[in-house]
Amino acid sequence: MYSEDDLLMLSALQHLLFCPRQCALIHLEQAWTENRFTAEGRVLHERVHSAASDSRSTVRVEYDMPIRSLRLGLSGRADIVEMHPQEDGFWQPFPVEYKRGRPKKDDTDQVQLCAQALCLEEMLDCTIPEGALYYGQKKRRTAVQINDRLRKVTEETTARLHELLSGTTTPPPQYNRRCESCSFIDTCLPKAAVGKKGQVRNYLTRMTES
Amino acid sequence: MKKHLNTLFVTTQGAYLAKEGETVAVRVEKKVRLRLPVHTLNGVVCFGNVGCSPFLLGFCAERDVTISFLTEHGRFLARVQGPVSGNVLLRREQYRRADDPTFSALMARAFINGKVANCRYLLNRTLRDHADKIDTNAMNKAVNHLTGLLKSLGRDLPLDKVRGTEGDAAHIYFSAFDHLIIHHKEDFFFRQRSRRPPLDLVNCLLSFLYTLVMHDVRSALECTGLDPAVGFLHRDRPGRSGLALDMMEEFRPMADRIALSLINRGQLQAKDFVVSASGGVRMKDKARKTLLTTYQERKQDVLQHPFLEEKMPLGLFFHTQALLLARFLRGDLDGYPPVIWH
């Protein structure tokens, strides 16, 4: 069990899955840069978050719900949690996470949704078998099963996250294709900051000798 | 890294800056003279009697736009800034390293390397472009002398030796500086550096330009999360921005070049200055405006960053250098690469 002081941001899971260095830059080094993608995401979320809870048909909808799990050591906010009435009089929570773009090939978004579900399960003492991802570009929901495999991946990722962020070291960059779409490319300097031996020394020699 | 954005300099006395939606409105005598979207700015510098609404101060702090207040003559008074950016790990590393004399000497060498190489570059340029108008013998001698000092900076030196080398280099460079003034020599001449107050027109220009560079370097360091007060070459002294002074070294010759081109192109004249009874020299409003405009334009020039080998506006170099320093302290680089013109 983690204490409240040790809770990490739920959104960090996504950053870790995208790139451990990006995750460390954001959460250890507190760097934040915005680009078109993050700005659009922010606007989308601001819109989601500005609405108060309302009721559509029989479903009760909670927006921007603060959530946490002491077992996983995570806290954050859930964009939307729908409460579906059950025949036995209980309300079944159903988390929906908003995403700007389109579905990704990896299960980054599923992991974040699953982490939200795990938080809700702990806080509301229930079981959540299913949630959904809403993609802004498709304007459509995709149902996500919160199954054993996804739970396992989520817990492993969370453990790795705690390991990374309990240290003070930012992992070295590994330049690849994805770097070009990363809003941190100018802070990360993946091409320069690869710790090439003698890189700066050679530069200094080159520039001062002549 | 930040995008290269503009700095808004407000020199009109009695101007008042207010927030209007997402813009800064500059009012003079209750009339709006200028509106600028805040997202296009990275700093606002107010000279003298310029007011700011609290809403604008708050809005700019939130958007990471630093507002600085200077006296009419460019002496720094205060700045308004949002929450401390960046991270405690970086600052702690900076403090630890600044306490280490070996590391401090290494950093000091890098900064001074940059400065001396750039001074030499400036002399060489003048030798190349104006050989017919200058004392080439004296200049060549100075260049050779600086080359010798650069060689010695390539070796491991303790901090006091680095400082000594810097002193020698400054002496040689400033001894040759008068040769860099090609035109209007009857009004513009350089004997030695004087600052408090500047005792001739050239020193007046240099001091003002250094203030501007200082402002940019300091905000770049702050934006990166470094503490501008804790330096390596410049040791702690209350009220002094040691690290900003350190990082300024490599940029000083750039400021010198701006002063020289203003003089040599005749953009400034003796009548643009006021000499007080004590001999201290100040710029008149018009001169200050010319200088600020030139400085801003210079920062828009797109140049190849010598270490990263990427093109970027000169104004972004301050941020890039702060970032490279942070990356070195965090262990990504094997040293700090100062900007060296080639």
Image (spheres, coloured by chain):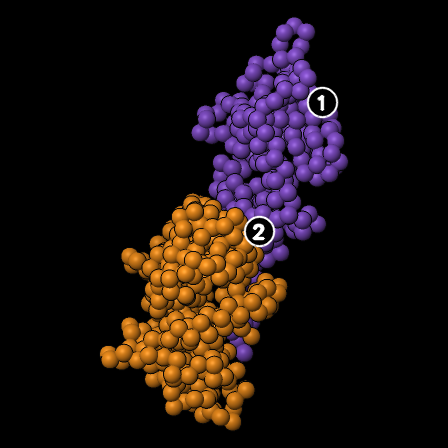
Q: Secondary structure at mark 2?
A: helix
Which residue is denoted by mark 1 in the rendering?
A145
Query: What secondary structure is found at the residue carrying circle 1?
Result: strand
Residue at mark 2 to residue at mark 1: CA–CA distance: 35 Å
Residue that appears at 41% across and 66% down? B11
Foreground residue among B193 and B18: B18
- Residue at 56% of width from left, 67% of height from top? B300
Mark yes or no: residue B238 visible: yes
Quadrant position of residue A90: top right
Give the residue at mark 2: A188
Q: Residue furthest bottom?
A: B132
Expressed as whole percent of the image width and height from the top left, the position of residue B171 reads 36, 79
Mark 1: amino acid: Gln
Image quadrant in which the C terminus of chain A is located: bottom right
The chain in purple: A
- Chain letter for the residue marked with disc 1 in the picture: A
Residue B246, above or below A147: below
Amino acid bearing label 2: Cys
Q: Nearer the viewer, residue A6 or B110?
A: A6
Tell me residue A16's x, y (percent).
Answer: 60, 38
Residue B329 rendering spot, x and y as whole percentages: 47, 53
Q: Residue at x 43, y 61 (%)?
A: B28
Marks 2 and 1, the one that precedes in the sequence = 1
The furthest residue to the front: B30
